Image: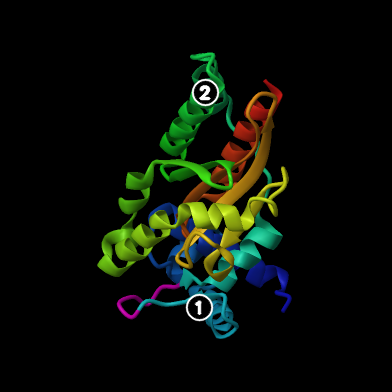
Amino acid sequence: MTLDERKQTLLEAVIKEHIRTTKAVGSSLLAEKYKFRLSPATIRNEMMDLENEGYLTHPHTSAGRIPTEKGYRFFIDNLLEERELNPREKAVLQKTYKDTKDSLIRIKNLAKMVAHLSREAVLIGFAPQDVYYTGLTNVFRQPEFSQIDLVYSLSEVVDHLDEAIEEIFNEITPEIKILIGKENPFGRRCSVVLTKYNHYRVGEGLLGILGPMRMDYNNNQALVKYTQELISNI
């Protein structure tokens, strides 16, 4: 289903605000902060339409809205802008990569730094049955994982990471791919930003940032893209 421009703008604002604050987003906040020249009542009606169409939902404890999986998917497919990684983070990654000459250690050190910069988990698939991951504590610190069932769910994903990597290893290309919810082999409650690199010594491998669906897709996409270029071109 297509959304008109106003609904797209409101959906984008709700998603960006929720990603930033972790909280449900209300019509009054949008009217005040984003200067839409729309009354809170008009924004509220539009948000209700977005909820009825499956793009937003509202927690029982709040009058505000949060994105659904369908809402995030629309945002990723239609509203996500490709962004250059900022110069400071580029410099940090370049220095990290050059700190050692061993290729495998270089890639693992890069993964640790990407996990630090993104505050998410990072996966490296050196081969379908050779998986390295780091930064899982970053994911467990996210508000979404304060619920014990989500912790168990992610723990189960970690136990089967090699199977998930093997499932998609040959399907992923150097083009950035974002998998969320039910399409994500790493867990229905999570998103992953994936690419494939090709290092002149260690060959092809997978690189991905894994986190909750409420992640900073703009920055994580830029991090994955630049890291892939760094591994593949140096």
Where residue 106 is drawn, which disc sits there?
Answer: 2
* Labels 2 and 1 touching (C-beta < 8 A): no
Front one among 103 and 179: 103
Question: Based on the displayed image, in which of its 4 quarters is residue 135 positioned?
Answer: top left
| SS label for mark 1 | helix
Q: Say whether residue 26 is magenta.
A: no
| SS label for mark 2 | helix
Q: Position of residue 178 (x, y in %)?
A: 62, 55
In this picture, residue 175 sits left or right of residue 23 = right
Q: Residue drawn 52% across and 75% down? A: 56
Q: Earlier in the sequence, mark 2 or mark 1?
A: 1
Q: Residue drawn 45% across and 60% down? A: 18
Q: Say whether residue 61 is magenta.
A: yes
Quote the CA–CA distance across marks 2 and 1. Answer: 50 Å
Residue 36: tell me if it is visible: no
Amino acid of disc 2: Arg
Q: Position of residue 36 (x, y in %)?
A: 59, 63
Q: Quadrant of the N terminus?
A: bottom right
Q: Position of residue 168 (x, y in %)?
A: 63, 56
Question: Based on the displayed image, in which of its 4 quarters is residue 157 positioned?
Answer: bottom left
* Residue identifier under label 1: 44
Against 160, residue 148 (above or below) is below
